[in-house]
Amino acid sequence: MANPLNAHQTLRRRLLWVGVITAMLVGVLTWLTESEKIDERVMALATHTAQRVSPQNLDAYASGRMTLAELELVIQDVATDHFGIIELYGPDKERILEYVPPALDKLEEELKRGGHIPLTSEASYLKRMVAGHFALVVAVPIARAGAAPSGYLEGVYLPDDATMGQIRMDVIRTVGLVVAAIMLTTLVTYPVVMALHREVTARTRSILRGNLELLQVLGGAIAQRDSDTNVHNYRVTLYALALAQAIKLPDSMMRGLVAGAFLHDAGKIGISDTILLKPGKLTAEEFQIMKTHVALGIEILKHSEWLLQARDVVAYHHEKYDGSGYMEGLSGEAIPLNARIFAVVDVFDALTSRRPYKEPMSPQRALEIMERDAGSHFDPALLRVFAPLATDVHERFSQAGEESLRAQLMPLLERYFMEGA
């Protein structure tokens, strides 16, 4: 049976990974988005500083009320607040003056590198690196509200490390808050998800258990129709699982094998008692009618998607390895693997079981007979694997009663049908 604790631990790990991965992805997206805003924040600082040159200053200079030297003093004041170079233009975009702070005269060529930005009625910028530091080349119109620009300021804005550090810390803080919010949401929703998972698991297991019980009831009803008991179904299923485990059959195929073992003769429900319970040998005509139980079994399975997984065994367990079987005359590996497995264990159980018309054979004697049919009736490779197991499984299961066999089979059914449920 699947361990519910393991299932919950798996879900817990998955929820944690979903939370971590989501937090990382959203964190990266937030970092990229907020990093784009760094330029905007630096541009806002540069624009605010540039606006110290007022339209009145330019109007006064144009009218002669302010000299070029006085205007340069205003520009020098602007330059003290992180501007490395400033060029001032008039309303017709003619350059009035250029100023480079003395401390940065050695960087003048690097500051000027990269060309100019078009002067327009909207502030604009170009991101650059100057002497290994982040910088913006900005162009800011100098204008009264609603009026045409009185001039333009173009310059290289060099924010100090403290300013940039503060802006980056704000970005990191924002990213951290987003990541923390996602992880907190994951932790808060975890109990709800786990409660829903437990409820779904319980209901799923209840449905599966009901289906397994139905499978056993149907198998028992079919067996009694043939004057047999459910013991044969339990025993042959345990034999089949032992052989399937030895060849490492995938769990998905194990489910089909179990269902097929219980329902292999489902079509016998449609065969008349006259033929089904006849004590003597069937005539050729009666045998042809008996063979139709395969087609009847397939028809029965069509009405249930869950039971349809038994189809390989129901449809092909009377095929023979050399192609002489029925209904389709398949041969070799064209016969589905589950049907080839079941053919081996079904005949073994028939030979080693007591019947009204015969005594049971020993496992050794049964294997001797079956080995003569290796390659004709049976898949020789499967028979070779089963032979060393035969005595052990026969000792464990052949004399056990129905309740004992059922008790031994149920853990295997829960393992293969309820794994992960």
Image (cartoon, rainbow, N blue to C red):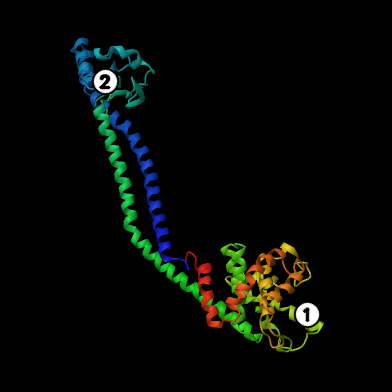
Element class at badge 2? strand
Q: Nearer the viewer, residue 53 or 213?
A: 213
Residue at the far right: name it: 284
Q: Report how many numbered discs are placed on residues in the image.
A: 2
**Which residue corresponds to the image point at 24% horizontal and 27% vertical from the top-left?**
48
Circles 2 and 1 in contact, beta carbons < 8 Å:
no
Q: Is residue 308 above or below residue 17?
A: below
For label 2, the residue is 83
| Residue type at numbered disc 1 | Gln
Q: Is residue 111 left or right of residue 397?
A: left
* Mark 2 burial class by Cα count in 10 Å: few <14, some 14-19, many 20+: many
Q: Amino acid at mark 2?
A: Phe
Question: SS at mark 1?
Answer: helix
User: Does the image show residue 196?
Assistant: yes
Q: Position of residue 245 (x, y in %)?
A: 59, 65
Query: In the picture, residue 142 is in which quadrant?
Result: top left
On the picture, is 354 further left or further right than 93? right
User: What x and y, as percent, mark residue 129?
Assistant: 35, 23
- Mark 1: give few (<14), some (14-19) or many (20+) Cα within 10 Å: few
- In the picture, measured across the screen, residue 71 lies left or right of residue 2, that is left
Q: Position of residue 288 (x, y in %)?
A: 78, 80
Residue at x 26% of width, y 31% of height: 165
One can see residue 59 in this view: no
Identify the residue under disc 1.
288
Tell which of 409 and 303 is nearer to you: 409
Q: 146 and 232: which one is in front?
A: 232
Q: Is 260 situated above or below 158? A: below
